[in-house]
Amino acid sequence: MIASNRLRLWLGQWCLCALAVCAVDSASAASLTVAVDGAGEHLEGAVVSLHSAAARAAIRPMSAEMDQRQAEFVPHVLPVTTGSRVRFPNSDNFRHQVYSFSPAQRFELPLYSGRQAQPVVFDTPGVVELGCNIHDWMLGYVIVLDTPYFATTGAAGDARIEAPAGDYTLQVWHERLEDGPGARVTRRVHVGAPRIERVTLELEAARAPPQPADARLRHLQERFRSLKRGG
């Protein structure tokens, strides 16, 4: 009976400690909603992220996938943390050859179908632009981030980031930024009481959906072939 009472007392104290820890975690958690627009429209597919020294220390590698369906990368934009392993399954009934020559990650996956390609580890922060050496019009992006606090805007142009309260550098990326796909817009923000941070981007003119004759994508492929030849 004495042992049983001691056990109940210990369990009660453990539960109180656990509740106290949860209360501290809940108290330190906060959120920021980022609303992104440009050229008079809400922007879907913008990657918003919060950066600080503490955020870098909290990074954990992820496992993620970017599929290939109907000769398109799905999702078109994939944000991941540094050190993450990304698989590129091929759900089409024909083969693809995925590649990138971006400074943040250069790689090539030889012709394959199904799920047989080995995952790629993305260790360096930056924007990795992807193409297919067989289908010129395929274009996708892996956004490698040195923070675990990020989100991607939906059709309404907004996204909510959950992070510990504090001061951060907000980064916003979108593929149509006028300074090129590697560009980002940054500003200092404070995360605390829930609020909306509005960001307006200067954009390139909207492009038609990529087609086999798309000059920009063909240029990507020609650069890839030049690199393969050692040029």
Image (spheres, grey):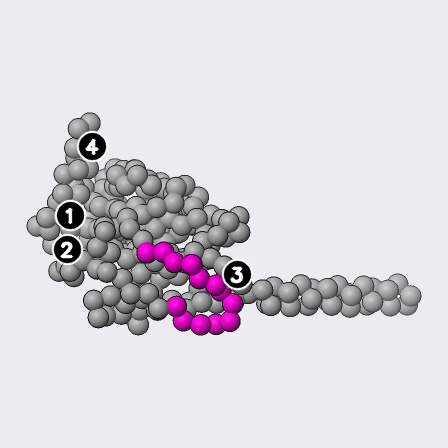
Element assignment for label 3: strand
Element assignment for label 2: loop
Is 180 or 145 nearer to us in this picture? 180
Query: What residue is rendered at 39% in x and 68% in y?
Result: 197
Q: Nearer the viewer, mark 2 or mark 3?
A: 3
Element assignment for label 4: helix
Residue, disc 1: 217
Mark sitting on residue 166:
3
Q: Which amino acid type is marked by label 4?
A: Leu
Does label 2 or label 3 sit earlier along the sequence? 3
Q: Is residue 63 left or right of residue 182?
A: right
Q: Which amino acid type is marked by label 1?
A: Leu
Residue, disc 2: 210
Query: What residue is rendered at 50% in x and 59% in y?
Result: 167
Query: What residue is rendered at 69% in x and 66% in y?
Result: 20
Q: Is residue 133 left or right of residue 119?
A: left
Magenta stretch: give its range: 185-197
Is 185 or 208 nearer to us in this picture? 185
Residue, disc 4: 227
The answer for how far apart the CA atoms under marks 2 and 1 are is 8 Å
Q: Which amino acid type is marked by label 2?
A: Pro
